[in-house]
Amino acid sequence: MRAKASISQSALTHNLSVVKQLTSGAKVVSMIKANAYGHHLDYIHPLIDGSDMLAVSELLEAEKLRAITKRPILLLSGVYSEAELQQAIELNCHIVVHHASQITIINNTHKSVSIWLKIDTGMHRLGLSTNEYKECLPLLKDNPLVKVACVMSHFACADEIGHPMNKAQLNNFKELTTKTNNRSMANSAAILSQAETAFDFVRPGIMLYGASPFNTPNNQLKPVMTLSAPILSIKTLQAGESVGYGATWIADKDITLAVVGIGYGDGYPRHAKNGTPVLINGILCPLIGRVSMDLICVDISSTKASIGDNAVLWGDEQLRVEVVANNSDTISYELLTGLSNRVSFTSVP
Ligand SMILES: *Cc1c(COP(=O)(O)O)cnc(C)c1O
């Protein structure tokens, strides 16, 4: 009896349709990096089939994705050697060029290649500087083997609505790309809050998986992953008795305690605070004591449960992953991508 993640196909379809409604006309590049934000490539076919393009962070991910689909793949990290360029071309990837050193590699290509130029408009992570961008354009235009398919940039603060960086980056991007046909800027937060950033290609990630980039649940989106684990033991605890490592939680009255078979060894966050909700038979019950590697303890005094009943850790309309993230000082992205291979995955309609 172990932890299970079930991946809802209809929720994926629904969330993708929300993206399309919000960005009518733009092509959708679905972010499939990090094994589809932890949802596993094998269980996300509605996304693979319904998107115009799929993006992964590196070549190994591109290889795995290419094994299951013929859709266009965008390689976000780009290539770092001629050998990687060859491999990316063989995998039929569109290649992001975010650093001046990559322009040389691309320009030496012997086969035709489609690239996405990434400009740094203010995030100062990956991306060509304004000058590098302007200087490389004529070089690339002269090369008949290189096709600049799109120009992209990435927001640093899109999840903070009204942050001055958003407008600054957008203006910067617009100024640099006035003559460009294919442009891409929007991640989930921008799709949900800045319609004017949709341009030609949008790049949704987290919202496809049903979580909000703002870390406050968005009821338009449907949770895709439901993480559950069985109750392994039930006992009564008397006032004054403690629970778990460090004896950090002490009962102030008699309670019924359930021990659930999931812990940080599965990817449940060790920093989840006392009181983090766990859904048991339709009732939200508080986590008590420290999260251990294989087990957590839950106060189930307010519900009826038996050994073998399933506890939902996240992914129900009643208990979204954002709530658990907020209770663990992290973001839904980290929780979703962090499940270990001890968790078994299944697909549900
Ligand atoms: C991951 C990623 C996205 C998607 O971000 P979300 O916040 O998950 O929507 C978009 N663009 C780039 C370049 C990314 O790396």
Image (cartoon, grey):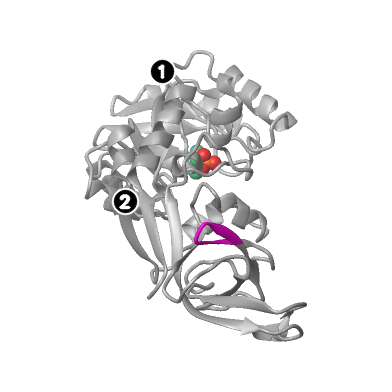
Residue drawn at point x = 64 percent, y = 62 percent: 276
Above or below, 102 relative to 129: below
In screen coordinates, is 149 left or right of 237?
left
Q: Quadrant of residue 269?
A: bottom right
C-alpha distance separating marks 2 and 1: 30 Å
Above or below, 23 relative to 39: above
Does the segment drawn in magenta span residue 279? Answer: yes
Q: Which residues are magenta?
A: 278-284
Q: Secondary structure at mark 1?
A: loop
Residue at image mark 1: 25
Q: Which mark is residue 348?
A: 2
Sooner in the amino-acid sequence: mark 2 or mark 1: 1
Q: Residue 307 versus residue 268: which sits nearer the camera?
A: 307
Q: Secondary structure at mark 2?
A: strand
Q: Quadrant of residue 272?
A: bottom right
In screen coordinates, is 16 left or right of 133?
left
In screen coordinates, is 86 left or right of 341?
left
- Check disc 1: other Cα within 10 Å, few if <14, some if 14-19, many if 20+: few
Q: Residue 281 versus residue 182: which sits nearer the camera?
A: 281
Above or below, 58 relative to 245: above
- Residue 74 location in percent, x, y? 37, 39
Q: Kindly tell me whether residue 98 is visible in this rendering.
A: no
In screen coordinates, is 168 left or right of 183?
right
The prevailing secondary structure element of the residues shown in magenta is strand
Give the number of callouts.
2
| Kind of residue sitting beneath label 1 | Gly
Q: Quadrant of residue 247?
A: bottom right
Residue drawn at point x = 54 percent, y = 72 percent: 264
Q: Residue 281 versus residue 105: which sits nearer the camera?
A: 281
- Residue 38 location in percent, x, y? 43, 55
Mark 2 vs 1: CB contact within 8 A = no
> Cβ of disc 2 within 8 Å of ligand 1?
no
